[in-house]
Amino acid sequence: MHKVYLGLGSNLGDRRWNIAEAVHFISERVGMVLRQSSLIETEPWGFESQNKFLNAVVLCETTKSPREVLQLTQQIERDMGRTHKRSMDHGQWIMDHEKLSIVNCQSSIYTDRCIDIDILLYDDITVDEPDLQIPHPLMYQRDFVMIPLKEINDNGNVNGNVNGNDNDNENEKR
């Protein structure tokens, strides 16, 4: 079994319900949710919006590979009404409509969303692929990730490793 930490965020609709529904789908499709952080309300990060976010982190036990977890969480986002998600390539967006079309988005790569699910950590592995990076490359810059992650992390360790070997990554926080 593998341990995966997932970051959840919602700033549209019934945000509490969206987070709860995402946790339900995660437990059905990805694996048993062992822990869930408190919900925290935060300002949007990386774009401007009048809609504040509710954020949380869950710890899940899974038999799925990192790639499978990514595919499952993206499907959960689509099933919950998420209509587009940024591609990691060249700041473009991939539109998830009947037919996929790529649209250039130079001004902002983030937007309001009913649900966002990010893989933060997966065991103590590192993945560096165009569409999958573990640990999440921006998590150390985001209090809305780090505060709930520290709340539920086994050993208080959030430096790219979920098994308790704490390697100090202070430089990554800057």
Image: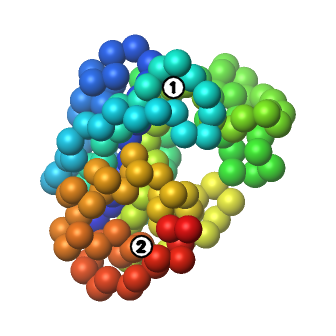
Percent x, y for residue 64? 36, 59
Q: Neighbour class for label 1 at 10 Å: few (<14), some, many (≥20)?
A: many
Extreme residue toward the top, this view: 13
Position of the N terminus by quadrant: bottom left
* Residue positioned 34% across, 33% down in the render: 41
Position of 21 with respect to 143 (left or right) is: left
- Please, what is the three-letter code of the amino acid marked with disc 2? Gly
**How many residues crowd mark 2 within 10 Å: few (<14), some (14–19), many (20+)?**
many
Q: Is residue 34 above or below residue 172?
A: above
Q: Position of residue 17 (x, y in %)?
A: 27, 21
From the viewer's side, name the closer residue of 52 and 60: 52
Kind of residue indicated by mark 1: Arg
According to the picture, the residue beneath numbered tag 2 turns out to be: 160
Q: Secondary structure at mark 1?
A: loop
Residue 86 figure quarter: top right
Q: Quadrant of residue 26?
A: top left
Nearest to N terminus: mark 1 or mark 2 = 1
Q: Is residue 160 left or right of residue 162?
A: right
Q: Is residue 129 shown above or below 21?
A: below
Residue labelled with disc 1: 113
Mark 1 and mark 2 residues within 8 Å of each other at the beta carbon:
no
**Residue 74, image x and y in percent?**
49, 39
Residue 22 visible in rendering: no
Q: Secondary structure at mark 2?
A: loop
Residue drawn at x 47%, y 52% is: 142
Q: CA distance from mark 1 to mark 2?
A: 26 Å
Residue 114 screen position, x and y as percent: 45, 23
Query: Does 86 appear above or below 138?
Result: above
Front-most of 97 and 7?
7
Q: At x 40% / y 82%, what residue is drawn?
A: 168
Q: Quadrant of the C terminus?
A: bottom right
The residue positioned 34% from the left and 69% from the top of the image is 158
